Amino acid sequence: MNTTDMHIPSNKVRDIERYFHTELAGLYPDSEITMFVRMLFEAFLGWTLTDLLLRRDDTVNQSDLLRFHWAAEDLKHFRPIQHIIGWTGFCGCRIEVDENTLIPRPETEEIVNWTIDHNSKLNNHNSQLTILDLCTGSGCIAIALAKQWPDAEVWAVDISKKALAVAKKNAAANNVSINFLQTDIIHSPFSVLRSPFSLIISNPPYVMDKERAAMQHNVLDWEPQQALFVPDSDPLLFYRAIADIADKHLAHDGMIVLEINESLGHETAQLFESHGFETALHSDFRGKTRMLTARHKQ
C-alpha cells in the first residue's frame, strides 16, 4: 500500500495530523482527535508534544505512515485508542489493555487515589496491610495499591483467565508482587489463603442491560461484556457476593471501597447495611455518586 492508496496527502507530520482531523470529523470532538494524534506519535515514534509542535515539516517513513493509516481506520470503527497503542496510564502505572479487559476510567483512578489519601482509616499500621481486589480485570487497582504500599500483601481475583493473564503481565511490568486467583465469586464458594483483609476493593460489573442504549460504540463493540453488564432483574448481584465475602474476610477494623452505579447508590448502601456495615456514599469529580465505602459497625 502506498500513500496514494491511503489518501494521506504526504508523509509530512502536518499532513498526517490534517488527515486525522479530516477523516474523523463528526465522529469525535476536534480536541479528542488532537489527543489521538499526540498519543499515536508518542506510541509509534516516541515523540513528545514539543516534538509534534516543532517538527511539523518532518516526514515519517512508509512503514510508520502505514501504522498511522490503520490507526485512523480503527478509530473510524471506534476501536479504543488504548487498544490501538496497547496500554493506558493509571495512577502513575502503565497498564496493558486489550479486548479481554476493561479500560480503566478516571473515576476508578479517583477511587484509588481516595483510598490512598485515606489510608489512615485502614487497618492498624502496626500490622501488615492486606488487600483484596475483586473483579480485578487488567489488575490496575491492585497494581496501583501495591506500588503505593510495597509491603502490603495484595490478592487480586477475576473469573476470566484471559483477563488474569493480562493482569499478571501488568504486575510484572510494574514490578509489583500480587497473588492472583481465578474464581467465580457469584456461583462458587469464595476461599482465599489469606484472611482477614484490611481492605476489600472492587470495580465490579454494574451497568444494567437497559443502559446499553446510552453507551458508546467504543465500549459496546470492544470491551468485554461480562465485565460491564448485569441483568436488570438483579443489578446488585456482584455487590451481594462482595458483601457475603466481606462478612467472612474483612478485618474488624477494615474497610470496603467500591465503585458503583450512580443510579443505585442508596440501594447498594442498603444492601451493605443489611449485612451490618456502616456505609457512606461519595461523589466523583463530575458530581456523580460513584463510590461506596463501608465498615463494620463499631
Image: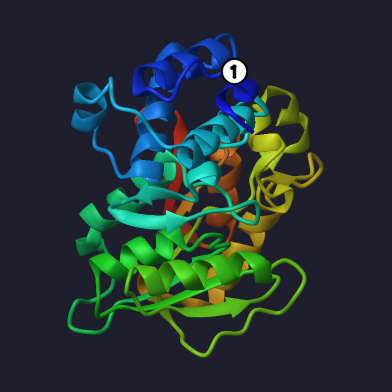
- Up-down relation of residue 13 to residue 232 (above or below): above
**Display colour scheme:** rainbow
Residue named by callout 1 = 7
Q: Amino acid at mark 1?
A: His
Residue lying furthest bottom in this view?
Answer: 193
Q: Quadrant of the C terminus?
A: bottom left
Q: Is residue 80 above or below residue 34?
A: below
Q: Secondary structure at mark 1?
A: loop
Q: Residue at x 72, y 47 (%)?
A: 225
- Closer to the camera in the image, 85 or 142: 85
- Give the x, y percent position of residue 65: 49, 33
The image quarter in which residue 191 lies:
bottom right
Q: Position of residue 263 (x, y in %)?
A: 59, 31
Compared with residue 38, is residue 93 higher up or lower down, i.e. above or below? below
In this picture, residue 246 sits left or right of residue 146: right
Can residue 285 be spotted in the picture?
A: yes
Above or below, 33 against 198 in this view is above
Where residue 187 sits in the image (x, y, percent)?
Answer: 77, 70
Q: Quadrant of residue 242?
A: bottom right
Is residue 6 or residue 102 the one in the foreground?
6
Res. 283 in view: no
